Image (tube, helix red, strand yellow):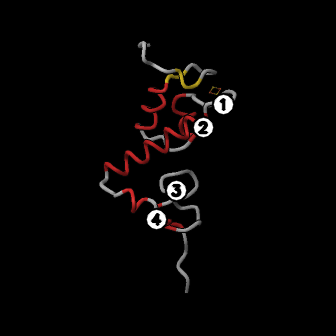
């Protein structure tokens, strides 16, 4: 561990950089982070920080895709990529058309 490394999850001794790496490998939810690197599986006090990292990584992915921030604030994109949205029947791809 380098001098600048920050332990994000004290219970499981998981570095912030490990959580970021897990998110960049594809984890999009707290549960997926827990599965990927165990962070957040103890007392839970670090879950807010993990959620912030997930939001920042989602924003980073969106910027990399070239979508402007103003577009991402529209309700259509709100929560995109988060747990329980895609295919959940709460709008978007999983919703049946109205006849
Ligand atoms: S500090 Fe991460 S679960 Fe307790």
The image quadrant where one finds the N terminus is: top left
Badge number at residue 48? 2
Does residue 59 sit above or below 18 in this rendering?
A: below
Disc 1 designates what residue? Answer: 45
Picture residue at 58% right of the left edge, 55% below the top: 84
Q: Residue at x 54, y 39 (%)?
A: 32
The quadrant the C terminus occupies is bottom right
Q: Which mark is residue 85?
A: none
* Residue position for label 3: 79
- Residue 41: x and y in percent read 64, 30
Whether pointer 3 and pointer 2 mark residues with C-beta atoms closer than 8 Å, the reply is: no
- Give the structural element (helix, strand or loop) at label 1: loop
Which quadrant contains ligand 1?
top right
Distance Cα–Cα, label 4 vs label 2: 24 Å
SS class, disc 2:
helix
Q: Where is residue 10, by image quadrant? A: top right
Please state the horizontal and vertical placement of residue 19, each as a whole percent of the image.
48, 30
46 is higher (above) or lower (below) than 7: below
CB under 8 Å between callouts 4 and 2? no
Name the residue tied to disc 4. Answer: 74
**Along the line of sight, which residue is nearer the eye, 79 or 91?**
79
Instruction: Name the element at disc 4.
Output: loop
């Amino acid at each position: 561990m380098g001098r600048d490394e920050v332990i994000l999850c004290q219970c499981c001794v998981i570095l912030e950089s490990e959580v970021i790496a897990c998110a960049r490998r594809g984890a999009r939810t707290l549960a997926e982070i827990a599965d990927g690197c165990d962070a957040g599986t103890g007392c839970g006090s670090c879950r807010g920080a993990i959620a912030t990292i997930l939001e920042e990584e989602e924003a980073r992915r969106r910027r990399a895709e070239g979508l402007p921030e103003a577009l991402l604030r529209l309700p259509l994109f709100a929560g995109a990529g988060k747990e329980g949205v895609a295919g959940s029947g709460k709008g978007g791809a999983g919703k049946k058309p109205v006849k």
